[in-house]
Amino acid sequence: LLAVCVGRGIEPFGKLMHDGTGEPASRKLGSWHEHIYRNTTFNRNAGTGHLIENCHIHHTGSGGISLSGGDRLTLEKGLNKVENCYIHHFNRLDRTYRAGINIDGAGNIIRHCEIAHCPANAIYLHGNDHIIEYNEIHHAVMTGDDMGAIYYGRDPSEFGTLVRYNLFHHLGSGDLKAGHRKITAIYHDDGACGMVVTGNVFYKAGSRGATIGGGNDNIYTNNIFIEGKLAVHHDNRLQGWASYMWESGNVFEQRMEAVNFREPPYSEAYPTLVNYFSDAPGLPKRNVIQYNLFCNFEMVYNGRSAYSGFGRNLILCSDPGFRDVEGLDFRIDPDSEVFRLMPEFRNIPMHLIGRLMGEK
């Protein structure tokens, strides 16, 4: 009950299950979500170079597009793309983990899309080396809790995704400032690693702009966070209640061994993964939050600076000269104090974000 499926699915299980192993099936998604919890390297044989373009997808039952391609074992890129699509109101029947776009495999692209009006995820991510860029995501995670508009997690080997030049705004609903619901634009859940987040705007983006749940090598630079209770939450859950995940024989070891993380291509593409289990696996390492602009937050960072190298950011309590806040244009006047106080910062190309002109 979705619009487009690129790649094989799994024959539906006969009963409701959190996870399991099923049989590959063509022309249906079926119980794919449940299957990949245990079978994280499942190759959907989705082909390469496919393009889903200029589509308007709405009022579907269980998500919008399921986009696969590439091979997680070899890191061969699929280069399948979703571009310039408007996807909204896509959870009439199944309201969680059925995103506007589910992306998996390796090396696929989501670009110039608008994804909006959903109870939970806008983009649900699995796999490696994807690019998510120039998208507008709004009015997502409207009823969910402990959830992100872009969400991935519980597999340190899902490394290498780039999230750049996206606009997240008006996420969640209700009194988010009260802190009763954990709504975030990007959620690196349960030890998720290796994402680069640069040049994005987070405006009224839930109760937390970003949540890093204990992982490594997540890089935030040159982003703008505007207005809210908390901009970035960063914890060390893998040293506490979630430590069982990296213990011998448990889920992290299973998923890392499945991709042969100590051998090429993983050891060459992601060298910091090689010593994951021998180098204090519960301690967040090599995360970076630098050269970002924070405006009008009750709290900017909830965590220890050692987890993230948090620093060299600019924190303001007023508008630094955004071009048009009501029109969601957060380019900054060249004469703004921002460029004097943080000369490393670069204006974000707001005019290029979202669906392409003439197609809206």
Image: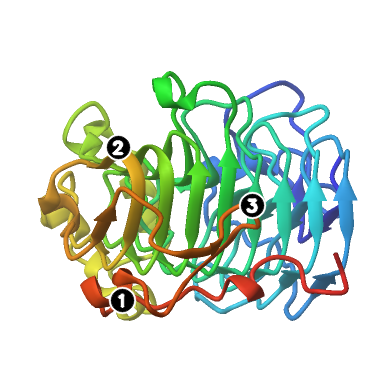
Q: Earlier in the sequence, mark 1 or mark 2?
A: 2
Query: Could you tell me which secondary element the residue under label 3 belongs to?
Result: strand
Gap in Å between the C-alphas at discs 1 and 2?
43 Å
* Amino acid type assigned to the residue bearing label 1 in the image: Phe
Report which residue position mark 3 lands on.
Answer: 137
Q: Where's the N terminus, which quadrant?
A: top right
Gap in Å between the C-alphas at discs 2 and 3?
31 Å
Counting from the top left corner in percent of width and height, residue 355 is at 76, 67
Residue 203's disc number: none
Front: mark 1 or 2 = 1
Left/right of residue 124 with respect to residue 243 in the rendered view: right
* Amino acid type assigned to the residue bearing label 3 in the image: Ile
Q: Quadrant of residue 69?
A: bottom right
* Residue beneath the point at 71% across and 51% down: 115
* Residue beneath the point at 21% across and 58% down: 276
Q: Residues within 10 Å of mark 3 (few under 14, many from 20)?
A: many
Report which residue position mark 1 lands on.
Answer: 339
Depth check, front residue: 89 or 9: 89
Front: mark 1 or 3 = 1
Gap in Å between the C-alphas at discs 1 and 3?
27 Å
- Where is 116 relative to 108, above or below? above
Depth check, front residue: 101 or 88: 88
Report which residue position mark 2 lands on.
Answer: 245
Q: Earlier in the sequence, mark 2 or mark 3?
A: 3
* Residue beneath the point at 15% across and 47% down: 283
* Amino acid type assigned to the residue bearing label 2 in the image: Met
Q: How is the image coloured?
A: rainbow
Q: Quadrant of residue 107?
A: bottom right
